[in-house]
Image (cartoon, rainbow, N blue to C red):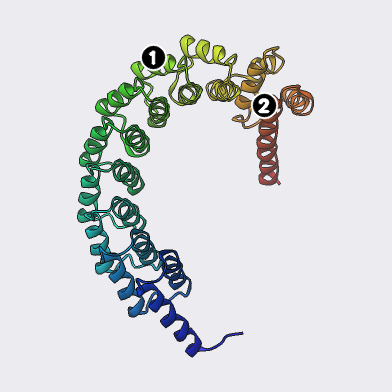
Amino acid sequence: MRLGKSFDKAVLEALLQVLKDKDESSLVRVKAADSLVRLDKSSDKAVLDALLQVLKDKDESSLVRVKAADSLVRLGKSSDKAVIEALLQALKDEDSLVRREAVDLLVRLGKADKNVIDALLLALKDEDSSVRRQAADSLGRLGKADKNFIDALLLALKDKNSLVRLEAADTLGRVGKADKTVLEALLQDLKDEDSDVRGKAADSLGRLRKADKKVIEALLLALKDEYYDVRLQAADSLGRVGKEDKAVLEALIKALKDEDSRVRLEAADSLGNLWHDKPDTELIDYLKHPLSGYRTAAAYALKHKKSISQKTRDEIIRLKDTDKRPWVRLGAWKAFELLQEKKEKEQKENQ
């Protein structure tokens, strides 16, 4: 039951009073800012003014200011010039938490004009690594790929902080182009001292899908990395950029015996991607192979087919129901379900 406009107004005024009360607990005021959003008073000037006032007040608790900024964005104030200017100003705040959240919120507003982009590029040089990392991620979410973006990200790949390097590598994989400069920078990152950065570089090289000889050779080397996550990402990327040549196939087949089951599964998936053009007659032999990785890879390859013979289908059913290895059964289940969907769709189209 609605309690009426007078009650709504009383609640709104009470929340605004709590938000402005510096003697109140920061956590209570954070909750007040959050509740103002849920009241859906985006058109109320008093709400906008109060949130902006808190955001701009440098004597305020950083937690309250960040929540005020978040509330402004959640209220959908992307077209309000005062909100954008306040967030841009927050990028210069002395508190790193406020600067970091301002970077994130500017992107959430969906504004990608020159002032915002220039501010984000400048944030990549912030003295605080968490701000630089957020800036690298935010640039990727904007989806821009012009020269200034790429140059800034390439510079971030050399950052002294490994998390910033990781985020820059990830963003280049999302928005970068597979030109010589980007590829060489990511190839260099495959030699980074931090295993997470090496893994992300391997992943980004795969996402750029450049079947370059140097890229493939570097990924083959990464497949021997001491850390499983680097090997896993290398296996995945080889399935995306690798050609069905002897060196790639031999390396992935060898990875089917990796000590880590996640790497073995990724190698099988990549082999499936590379084998999807093989005829049923050849893949059915792999479905019966004594090495479980071969069976899994063959199942993954078959899921790419438009249709298969009844003999191959029977073998897939056998694997999904009876194979001793759970990853083989999983691969066979996926292949069976996708093939079944394709078969049913074709039958409907022919009716």
Other-residue count near label 1 (Cα within 10 Å), few / some / many at <14 / 14–19 / ≥20? some
Query: At which x and y percent is residue 283?
Result: 65, 18
Residues 249 and 194: in front is: 194
Residue at 64%, 15% (x, y): give it.
282
Residues 283 and 49: in front is: 49
Distance CA(mark 2)–CA(mark 1): 28 Å
Q: Which residue is mark 2?
A: 327
Asked if residue 196 lies left or right of residue 98, the reply is right
Q: Which residue is mark 1?
A: 217
Amino acid type, residue under disc 1 in the picture: Glu
User: In the displayed structure, would residue 109 be above or below residue 290?
Assistant: below
Other-residue count near label 2 (Cα within 10 Å), few / some / many at <14 / 14–19 / ≥20? many
Disc 2 element: helix
Asked if residue 93 lies left or right of residue 253, the reply is left
The image quadrant of residue 72 is bottom left
Determine which of the numbered discs, if any, sits on residue 73 in the image.
none
Residue at 23%, 45% (x, y): give it.
121
User: In the displayed structure, would residue 201 be above or below residue 168?
Assistant: above
Q: How many marks?
A: 2
Amino acid type, residue under disc 2 in the picture: Trp
Query: At which x and y percent is residue 47?
Result: 36, 76
Disc 1 element: helix
Query: At which x and y percent is residue 104?
Result: 34, 52
Which residue, as the protein is rendered here, is positioned at the far front?
23
Disc with the residue nearer the chain's start (2 vs 1): 1
Q: Quadrant of the N terminus?
A: bottom right
Q: Are marks 2 and 1 in contact (CB under 8 Å)?
A: no
Residue at 32%, 64% (x, y): give it.
78
Query: At which x and y percent is residue 227?
Result: 48, 21
